[in-house]
Image: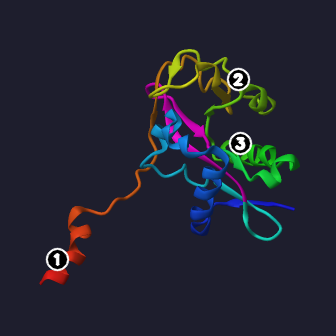
Amino acid sequence: MTEIVLESVEDVAPREALLDLCMGEGRKAKSSERLREGRLPADGLAFSAHGPDGRLAGTVRLWNVTAGPARPALLLGPLAVHPWFRTRGLGGDMMRASIAAARAKGHGAILLVGDAAYYERFGFSAEKTGQLWMPGAYDRNRLLALELKAGALGGARGLISPTGTRIALPSLAELLAPALLKSA
C-alpha cells in the first residue's frame, strides 16, 4: 500500500533521484523546466507517495503560471513513479489526488506537457491550448489542459509564464560572510 502525502523536506533528495531515474539526464532541458526553475511549487500542491517501507515511490507537483496575460493556471509536472510501482495505478492515484487538491484550493485550470493518450482519462485535452505557447522547444500536440472551473481558459492566448513564489537565494554578502570571517 502506498500513501500519498504532501511533500516534505525529507523527500527532496529522493525526489531528485527518482526524477533522474525516471526521466534521465535531459529532464532539465525541457521547456516545462523553464517555468519551474527558481520557483517553489504552488502552496500545498506538491505530493509524494511512499511505499510500504517508507521509501519514495512517486512524486507530482503543481506550479503557479499564467496561461497568457492575466489568466492564472497551474502547471502539473513532473509526475514520476518508481518502476517498481508503475503497474499498480500509483500514477493515476497521484493525478487524481493532485487534481482534487487543486480544485479544493479554488484553482481554475491545470496545464501540462504530456502524452494525450495517458492524460485524457483525467479530462486533459489540447482543446484549450491552441493559442498558448511555452518558452523554448516543445511538442504542441503534448500541451494539454484541464479546466477545473468552466471557462477558466476561455480565450486564453499567449505565452505561459511562471508566477509562483521565487526560491529565496542568499545575497552575495551572506555567501561571502564565512570567507570574510576566516580572513579577519
What quarter of the picture does the N terminus occupy? Answer: bottom right
Q: Nearer the viewer, mark 3 or mark 1?
A: 1
Given the image, on which type of amino acid does mark 3 rest? Answer: Ile
Q: Name which residue lies at 82% across and 53% down.
A: 85
- Work out whether residue 91 or residue 6 is closer to the camera in this orientation and state it: 91
Q: Which residue is mark 3?
A: 99
- Work out whether residue 78 or residue 61 is closer to the camera in this orientation and state it: 78
Residue 45 visible? The answer is no
Are the two marked residues, 2 and 3, in contact with CB atoms closer than 8 angstroms? no
Residue 137 visible? The answer is yes
Q: Name which residue lies at 62% across and 64% down.
A: 11
Given the image, on which type of amino acid does mark 2 rest? Answer: Ser
Question: Is residue 36 positioned above or below 126 on the image?
Answer: below
Residue 165 x/y as whole percent: 44, 50
Mark number displayed over residue 180: 1
Q: Residue 15 vs residue 84: left or right? A: left
Determine which quarter of the picture holds residue 63: top right
Q: Could you give the CA–CA distance between mark 3 and mark 1, rounded to whole angstroms?
A: 49 Å
Local crowd size for mark 3, using a 10 Å CA cut-off: few (<14), some (14–19), many (≥20): many
Residue 101 x/y as whole percent: 69, 48
Is 42 included in the stretch rendered in magenta? no
- Per the rendered image, the range of residues in magenta is 57-78
Mark number displayed over residue 125: 2
Q: Residue furthest left?
A: 184
Q: Could you give the CA–CA distance between mark 2 and mark 1, rounded to whole angstroms?
A: 55 Å
Given the image, on which type of amino acid does mark 1 rest? Answer: Leu
